[in-house]
Each structure stands twice: as structure tokens, then as C-alpha cells.
Image (cartoon, rainbow, N blue to C red):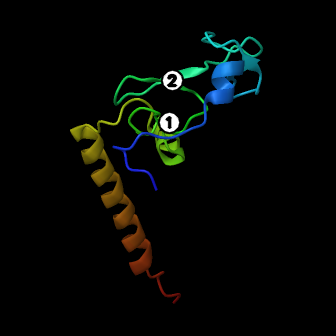
Amino acid sequence: MMNRSEPATTSNARVEADGSPCAKCGHVNSRNANVCEKCQAHLWVVCHHCGKRNRRSDNSCVECGHRLHRSMWRRVAKRLTGDRRNISVWQIVLLIVVVWCAFKVVIYFAEYSPPSPE
């Protein structure tokens, strides 16, 4: 298992000689291309930790070993919460009121006894 302090070791000999393969469609592009000639996908990502330019198909930075892409859980969480993750006070108060009302309704029906027929 690789530490974040260790650089990732990848065999880039063929890639550097032939060009950069697209992570999306597999098309081999010229070495200095920034986007795929076939599908227009970005070929490179920049490491947020050290700033090194890496192939999009790499999982970790070749310079510092830092993760380049978000995990599946983080992507799902971002789609669910959007860009805002801050919860305001009124949202918490509203949640408490709704839970309290739901609790009272459940208790009311649990303790309800129909009138006896006479």
C-alpha cells in the first residue's frame, strides 16, 4: 500500500513515446494535447496537493502520491447536498419542530381508544 509521502510509480514510457491515452474513450492523443481529439475530454488533472500535472487516468499523483479523484461516496454526497453544506439555525429548529409534531401524532394514535358502543 502506498503512503501519501511516496510518489506513485507508473510506467509512462509507452505513453510518453506514443502520446496520452484518453481515460474516457481510449484514443491515443498527441503528447502535448490538453483535450482528447476524439471526444474532447480533458486529458490532464492537476494535483491539489502539490500542483503537478497528471494524466486523468491516474488515481494518484505521480509526484506526491495524493489522491487525484474524489471517492464514490464524496461524489454521491455532493450530488445529494449540492454545493452548500452549511445548515442554518432555522433549518435545525424546523427539523426539531417537525420531529416533535410527528412524535405527538404517533403518541395520539397509540393512546387513542374509540368510544365504547352503548
- Residue 7: quadrant of the picture: top left
Which mark is on residue 37? none
Where 57 falls versus 20 (above or below)? below
Q: Position of residue 65 (x, y in %)?
A: 42, 40
Whether residue 117 sits left or right of residue 91 in the image: it is: right
Residue holding disc 2: 45
Instruction: Please indicate whether residue 87 sits to the left or right of residue 75 in the image.
Output: left
Q: Secondary structure at mark 2?
A: strand
Whole-percent x, y for residue 54 in the image: 51, 26
The three-letter amino acid code for the residue at tag 1 is: His
Please name whichever residue, 118 or 18, is drawn nearer the observer in this view of the structure. 18
Q: Position of residue 102 (x, y in %)?
A: 39, 61
- Mark 1 nearby-residue class (10 Å; few <14, some 14–19, many ≥20): some
Q: Where is mark 1, residue-wise?
A: 69
Q: CA distance from mark 2 to mark 1?
A: 9 Å
Q: Is residue 19 visible?
A: no
Q: Earlier in the sequence, mark 2 or mark 1?
A: 2
**Residue at position x 36%, y 45% in the image:** 4
Q: Residue at point 46% right, 34% down?
A: 61
Q: Amino acid at mark 2?
A: Val
Q: Nearer the viewer, residue 41 or 22?
A: 22
Q: Position of residue 20 (x, y in %)?
A: 66, 21
- Identified at 44% across, 82% down, the residue is 113
Determine whether the residue tagged by mark 1 lies in a helix, strand or loop: loop
Count of marks placed on residues: 2
Q: Outermost residue toward the left?
A: 89
Q: At 63% from the left edge and 22% from the top edge, which residue is drawn? A: 16
Are discs 2 and 1 less than 8 Å apart at CB? yes
Q: Is residue 61 visible?
A: yes
In the rendered structure, the answer to whether residue 33 lies left or right of residue 74 reads: right
* Label 2: few (<14), some (14–19) or many (≥20) C-alpha neighbours in 10 Å: some
